[in-house]
Image (cartoon, grey):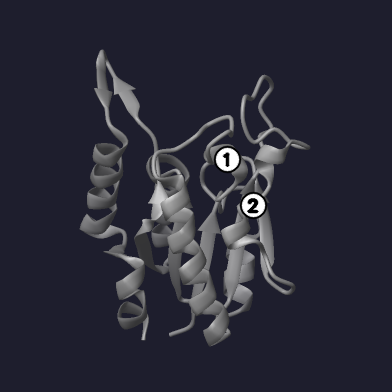
Amino acid sequence: MKTALVLIDIQMDYFPGGAMELSGSEAAAAKAGRALGWFREKGWPVVHVQHLSARSGATFFVPGTRGVSFHHYVLPAEGEQVVVKHFPNSFRGTGLQDILDQTDVKRVAFAGMMTHMCVDATVRAAFDLGYQCLVLADACATRDLEFGHEEVKAGKVHAAFLAALGAVYAEIVGVKDMASALE
């Protein structure tokens, strides 16, 4: 089954010194870089998704800033597709589905940021579009959230969203188990 890797928003605003630093972003980017290297070795398709904010008053992913640049672990190589998006769902208003369909992709491995937002929205959309989905859990990162007056730590947010995705929408694995899950 033809499989693609989709790397979602692994951009500098999510790293130390960025406008929206995430918990564990460096470690997740390193794992995403390992997955990217494996896909490149196999010659399998890779799509990089870049979020550019189109909202007035946006505080991160502002076009023209360093924050929208891809992290050095996952820089696109020549011939790899780059999809620009303006919404959490990487399929909404982009050519992502066309790219996957034109290359006859049936299964997609996802890595990226933020687990609770863009990764979640994209994986659910991919499932609804008929793709078999795999989420590389340790190649994703998120941040602390607040609900009511309670702080929910990033680790709990990450685990809750991956647990929900794993119930129906995707197989959840670590990068070290990716090869056996895909071959």
Local SS, label 1: loop
Percent x, y of residue 18: 58, 34
Count of marks placed on residues:
2
Question: Which residue sits at x=35%, y=30%?
Answer: 144
Q: Name the residue under label 1.
A: 87
* Image mark for residue 70: 2
Considering every residue shown, the one lying at the far top of the view is: 149
Q: Which residue is drawn at 58% across and 29% down?
A: 19
Q: In which quarter of the image is residue 151?
A: top left
Give residue 95's quadrant in the image: bottom right
Q: Is mark 2 on a helix, strand or loop?
A: loop
What's the residue type where badge 2 is placed?
Answer: Phe
Left or right: residue 24 versus residue 79 is left
Q: Which x, y percent locates residue 11?
A: 60, 46
Asked whether residue 105 appears in the rendered view, the answer is no
Q: Where's residue 114, x and y in %?
A: 44, 43
Q: Is residue 134 left or right of residue 122?
A: left
Against 113, is 172 above or below? below
User: Of marks 2 and 1, which one's residue comes earlier in the chain?
Assistant: 2
Quarter of the picture containing the N terminus is bottom left
Rendered position, 135 above or below 62: below
Q: Nearer the viewer, mark 2 or mark 1?
A: 2
Look at 49% across and 78% down and name the residue there.
38
Identify residue type, mark 1: Phe
Q: Distance between the Cα atoms at labels 2 and 1?
A: 17 Å
Answer with left or right where residue 180 lies relative to residue 62: left
Q: Which of the 4 quarters of the picture holds residue 57?
A: top right
Relative depth, front residue between 150 and 85? 150
> Where 151 sits versus 142, above or below?
above
Q: Image point 62% across, 24% down: which residue?
A: 59
Q: Determine if residue 127 is in view.
A: yes
